[in-house]
Amino acid sequence: MRRRSKSTTDQSKSWLVTFTDMVLIILVFFIMLFSISVVDAQRFQALTDSLQGNNILDDLSSVTDYELENFDPADDQDVDEDTDPLTEVKEYIDQYLIDHDLEDMITATREEQGIVLVLQEQLLFNTGEAYILEDAEPFLDEMTMILEGIPDHQIEVEGHTDNRPIETYRYPSNWELSAARASSVIRYLIDGGDSLQEDRFLAKGYADTRPMVPNDSRENMQENRRVVVMISDPEFDEEGTENT
């Protein structure tokens, strides 16, 4: 009877050992979590102290303060004034002509009075006509966008022909044809834009009075049939007015 009683007592106390182990494990787990959080906080504080100790954070704030203190809006204004918008336009057009393989059809030069574009007839019109060809539309659309970006510049468009006479109901002579071609280009530019004012444009028809080369060959005649677009430089116009 005593042996059975002792065994029963041992079994009744065994759960205490298991419970104690479980409590101990949970306690150790929470201690570990707490120690990790303390270490992370200490590391963050140590990093902050290190940056401040090496004057890194102070240097960043001092650079910002220096830039604000030494910022002069007049400096930016001088840079903008020194930038020639027509030079940038010329560079943009040159790259466009290269990218679209139009260097044989269009030439662009920066003259004292502005940018001069020479567009060959075969790009713009059929012979003896003044209707814009579809192949010319992408470049003219690009020109519309460019001209909208420089609203202070006037645009002159000239029509030129070779010396072969023309006599049709619509175009009795090269004078009417050259003027109609200049007007067609202007009308296309204005109709394609949202903000191009008509008073910025001037159409001129020169017929065959200003050939680039003698009209003594088919190739030369083709070169003389052209439209010239001149984007005027306002500063040049002002200087010209003062000198007259």
Image: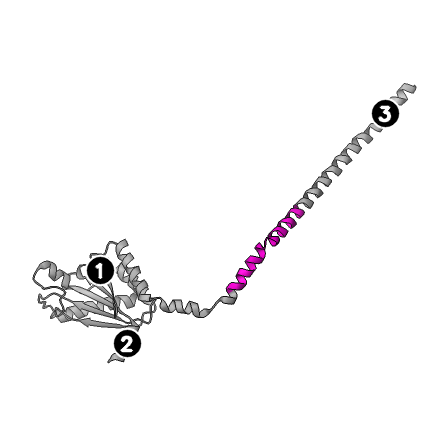
- The part of the image, by quadrant, that contains residue 111 is bottom left
Q: Position of residue 38 (x, y in %)?
A: 69, 45
The type of residue carrying mark 1 is: Ile
Residue drawn at point x = 39 percent, y = 67 percent:
79
Quadrant where the C terminus sits is: bottom left
**Does residue 172 appear left or right of residue 42 in this picture?**
left
Relative to 133, residue 209 above or below: below
Q: Which amino acid does label 2 sit on?
A: Glu
Q: What crowding class fits label 2: few (fewer than 14 Cα within 10 Å), some (14-19), or many (20 or more)?
A: few
Which mark is drawn over residue 148? none
The residue lying toward the viewer, choosing from 61 and 224, is: 61
Circle 1 sits on which residue?
106
Residue at the disc numbered 2: 239
Residue 71 visible in image: yes
Determine the CA span between mark 1 and mark 2: 29 Å
Crowding around mark 3 (Cα neighbors within 10 Å: few <14, some 14 to 19, many 20+) is few
Q: Position of residue 48 (x, y in %)?
A: 62, 52
Q: In which quarter of the image is residue 141?
A: bottom left
Give the Cα separation between the discs numbered 3 and 2.
116 Å
Going from N to C along the chain, the mark reached first, 1 or 2, is 1
**201 magenta-colored:** no
Q: Main secondary structure of the magenta part?
A: helix
Secondary structure of the residue carrying tag 1 is strand
Q: How crowded is mark 1: few (under 14 residues within 10 Å), some or many (20 or more)?
A: many
Which one is in front, 25 or 34? Answer: 34
**What residue would you read off at disc 3?**
10
Q: SS of the residue at dot 3?
A: helix
| Residue ID at (24%, 73%) | 202
Magenta residue span: 40-67
> Distance between the Cα atoms at labels 1 and 3?
108 Å
Q: Magenta includes 59? A: yes
Instruction: Give x and y (percent) for residue 6.
Output: 89, 22
